[in-house]
Image (cartoon, coloured by chain):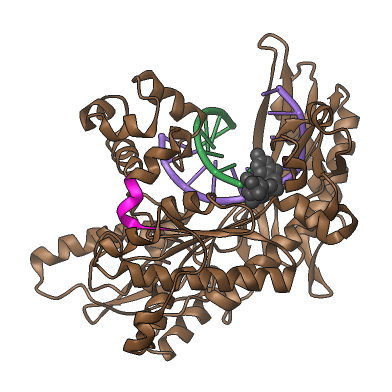
Chain colours: A brown, B purple, C green
Amino acid sequence: MNLHSSVVIHVDIDYFYAQVEEVLNPNLKDKPFGVQQGLNMVTCNYIARSFGIKKWRPVKECLEKCPDLVLVKGEDLSEYKKFSKRIAELLHEEFGSTERMGLDEHYMDITKLAEDKLALLTDEELTNIRFAGPFYPNEEAFSKCSCGCENRLMVGSQIAQNIRDKILNELKLTCSVGIAHNKLLAKLVGQMNKPNNQTVLAPIAAAEFMAELKEVRNIFGVGGKTAERIEELGIKSISDLQNCTFEKLRNYFTQETAVRLKEAALGIDNSVVRPSGKPKTVGLEHSCPPITIRSDVEKMFQDLLPQLVEHIENDARIPEGLKVTIRQYNREKKASFKETKQCVLLPSYFKHFDEKIKLSDHAHDLIMKSVMSTFDKIIGKEKFYINLVGLCFNKFRELKRGTSSIESFLKKRKSEGETSDDNDQSPPSKRQKIVNRNSIPANVDQSVWRDLPIELQQELMRSWQSSSTNDNSSDMIKSSTFASESSQGLKLKSNGNLKNVNTLYNHFNKK
DNA sequence: CCGGGGGCAT
DNA sequence: ATGCCCC
Ligand SMILES: Nc1ccn([C@H]2C[C@H](O)[C@@H](COP(=O)(O)OP(=O)(O)OP(=O)(O)O)O2)c(=O)n1
Ligand SMILES: [Mn+2]
């Protein structure tokens, strides 16, 4: 289990919204073209970029730089979501499960796939394999490590080429792909030869690669606020971060953050690729010119609700919660702020029709009443200037039993024996953190382990620690089954004893 | 401060 | 419920 033992791929579709529009309307392909949301140009094709136009600039500024820029409105994301779904399905079918980041990016852990492909090669074939695509920094750098990463990454680069070919042939979309020994580096190195290309990183060059990126904002998880705090320490670049003492970081950040920053600066990232399940929330929002009248607000929500229901009609789940969002202009602070409030949805609000989820007969009016009373609670009695309203379904419950996702997934896996084959959605999972590769007990089946909810992982670790003091049995997990969420039948066989962790899982779900 | 999403920690 | 992060 050395530092370079994994192969991670990051796929990022080029100029995503704009490229989707090009597929929908090929006339746009030979023109400078961008997608507009409100007053902003969100993204544009690379012809437009050759005029010096950057993503996320005001439309006005873009038209000054390129008067011939063609613009299409992109406030409605449904087409982009459709393509996003097709991409996810294609990747999953052909190469295994993925972790989604937004609509157009996916991480994949292809370590097993690469190792399996390597194992099939003869010695002669092994000496003749070549990298696909460009590398960082150069080909020689790969041979300086003898842990086997060179061959794994070489095969990884070939798989990356296959992925790009597949996405281009099936969906007519170009993408950029990074191949590296961890997620952090895969994502960053993939940007090197954008668009429509790929880049593989030599592990020994990781720290040097990070240093050349300069800005600490390039580190995943370091946003505006964290970057500001880092700079308060006088640290202005990733190489500053590499060279500063750990204690200096530890004084301003939590232990966890300090370690993460220090490691990331050196190109070290132990976080695991975590297959995405179905979305945990599905929302819709509309911005609008300032509204001051309650009935106008109601019209906005009236409009949103049916659209939102359409978004989940094929989901096989129903939401039990609804988050109401408004954005208000605050004249004292001269700024807009979002406020939200939860309200409860009853299962009886939904019915099936044509295999699809629809609102029951009077549910629209009932939900609207909840929404508006929730709105009143947010506003109080003050006058208001609302410039955005939003609704977001959450607290989803699975409808089907028995053959539902996770149960059938693990059962199938059992019958397939040892070959761990990623296939289905993962159960709820929390942020990375504790789920480092290195912290997982060695004799645990990792392909099963990594898909467990973090709460269960933690609870199991605790139980193993305590049981090892009064018990000489090993920690081996022999098998596990996970029934659908509605029956909550998660059981883990451990030490020959069937541990029923239902109560545990229920407990965590309540809060 | 502007689009329209989504995830997770607190 | 809010804040920070990601796209
Ligand atoms: N703040 C943001 C960031 C991104 N997006 C959308 C528009 C992009 O098309 C899509 C993907 O984001 P990317 O950062 O990957 O940008 P692009 O794919 O458009 O361009 P690139 O070719 O640089 O990847 O997500 C958005 O709506 N709002
Ligand atoms: Mn992209």
Magenta residue check for A247: no
What residue is at 86 percent from the left and 27 percent from the top? A294
Residue A506 falls left or right of residue A500: right
Q: Is residue A279 above or below residue A160?
A: above
Residue A170 falls left or right of residue A299: left
| Residue A67 image position (x, y, % from top left) | 88, 33
Furthest-top residue in this view: A332
| Residue A219 image position (x, y, % from top left) | 44, 40
Which quadrant of the figure has residue A418?
bottom left
What residue is at 69 percent from the left and 60 percent from the top? A84
| Residue A464 image position (x, y, % from top left) | 20, 64
User: In front: A463, or A422?
Assistant: A422
Residue A265 visible within the image? yes
Magenta span: A201-207
Q: Is residue A474 above or below residue A311?
A: below
Q: Is residue B10 above or below residue A105?
A: above
Q: Quadrant of the N terminus of chain A?
A: bottom left
Residue A128 falls left or right of residue A326: left
Count of labels in the image = 0
User: In front: A323, or B1?
Assistant: B1
| Residue A92 image position (x, y, % from top left) | 58, 73
Residue A194 falls left or right of residue A383: left
SS majority, magenta: helix
What residue is at 48 percent from the left and 52 percent from the top? A189
